Amino acid sequence: MSQYKRYLAYKDSGVGWLGRVPEHWQVRSTKALACLDGGSGFPDEEQGQSGNPIPFFKVADLVTSLRYAPNTVTEETARRLGAKIFPANTLVFAKVGAALFLNRRCLLKMPACLDNNMMALLPVSCDARWLFWVFSAINMGVVANPGAVPSINQEQVGNIKLGVPSDLEQRNIARGLDRETARIDALIEKKTRFIELLREKRQALITHAVTKGLDPKVRMKDSGVEWLGSVPEHWSVKRLKFIATVQTGIAKGKDNAEKDTVEVPYLRVANVQDGYLDLEEVATIEVSTADLPRYLLQPGDVLMNEGGDFDKLGRGHVWHGEIGQCIHQNHVFAVRPHGVSSEWLNTFTSSTAAQFYFMGRSKQSTNLASISSSNLMELAVPLPCEEEQRLILDELDRQTAKISALGAKTESSIALLKERRSALITAAVTGQIDLRESA
């Protein structure tokens, strides 16, 4: 942050998180600058009624910056239940649970009621936007009461010490941070979109290669499968059940009373990612020694998720025996090829074509989907000869490696931008940099 000037003189604030602050700043507690209050819970039957609707925000709504309220209550209901209607420019954040550590702060855009898991700070003798940026720099997880469900109370928040400049300087700091963070956010958004385009390009490359091959002049034929379309004339198309077996996994809670058992590692949906295995945390389970062979994974198995969120449906990777004597849960299929290479099958099932089939055959509910083993076995798989499979996979490895490297580089730059954004906010609200001229 060498482009920003520092103040001419500093003093010790006497507050650990503030350190040394500009000499002309005051050190004041939050409760001297703003009124603190908590939200109120509303029974489901009291929500969404007609007549003078008031937005009712819950902790989950903090991700939308409180611009849209999916829930409402009536003004009459709020007053009858003694719930406060907070005015616009009230600072809002979570006061309990894991949301404390997400550091989400929002200013109300309109009068609204709040969930009882949220806390409100109504600025009285300070600028609302400045207060927003100050609290964006404060880690509530450090202030919170420890325990299984962390929480903070009004007294704790009210006693937080802040470095307070003049009203004019508060507005200048807020304007400066608004402008500088907007520039960083725009760049992050641009880079994030670039990563999405890289993923789309990677997916398109894979899908074209495993359904059309590498030769643009090859003669094509109708595959006989509507969602698959045309495939190279010399390729065959076979149902998965003719080229592989599908092994279902173990269900938790199986009764092993009076049986000899052994504790073994087992893979869950969380371990089976799209294109890789996350083995940092592998759970264990008790299984009877008689049932163990039935669930054991073998090198070359193609692991595929039965379902979950839409993006988890059918995703997977090849098992290479990374963990000895490992089994899998019932939400992860182990597809064991015998008429196709594991790598080819895994690559094809990650293609847009296969994903289209999975979604079409899955059972779906809100944001969730699952596919049965019987539907999975009916998947049509295009099959070039083994040599062509290898050539196509080698070319895909070469092309996707370049895309992955560029994506990783871009993700690293986004991480640095986010660090810079956080450091900029902290430096500005603690007086380590002077934004007065830049405002």
Image (tube, grey):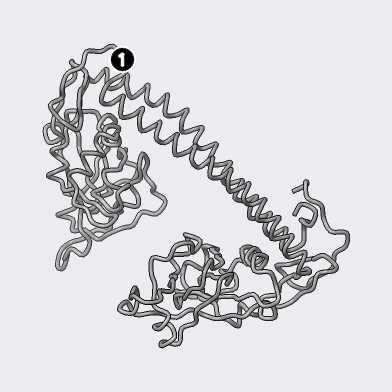
* Type of amino acid under label 1: Pro
In the shown orientation, is residue 317 left or right of residue 29?
Answer: left
Tell me residue 414's x, y (percent): 56, 44
Q: How many marks?
A: 1
Tell me residue 393's x, y (percent): 33, 24
In the shown orientation, is residue 422 left or right of residue 386?
Answer: right
The residue nearer to you, when weighing 324 against 401, is 401
- Determine the residue positioned at 25% across, 50% down: 307
Crowding around mark 1 (Cα neighbors within 10 Å: few <14, some 14 to 19, many 20+) is few
The residue nearer to you, when weighing 187 against 214, is 187
In the shown orientation, is residue 14 left or right of residue 348?
Answer: right
Tell me residue 399's x, y (percent): 42, 25
Q: Is residue 15 visible?
A: yes
- Determine the residue positioned at 42% across, 24% down: 398
Q: Residue furthest front?
A: 51
- Determine the residue positioned at 21% across, 53% down: 364
Using the rendered view, name the quadrant where residue 52 is placed.
Answer: bottom left
The residue nearer to you, when weighing 72 against 7, is 72
Tell me residue 119's x, y (percent): 53, 75
Check the image and report above or below for 156 versus 295.
below
Is label 1 in a helix, a strand or a loop? loop
In the shown orientation, is residue 366 left or right of residue 183?
Answer: left
Check the image and report above or below for 69 versus 313.
below
Q: Is residue 150 visible?
A: no
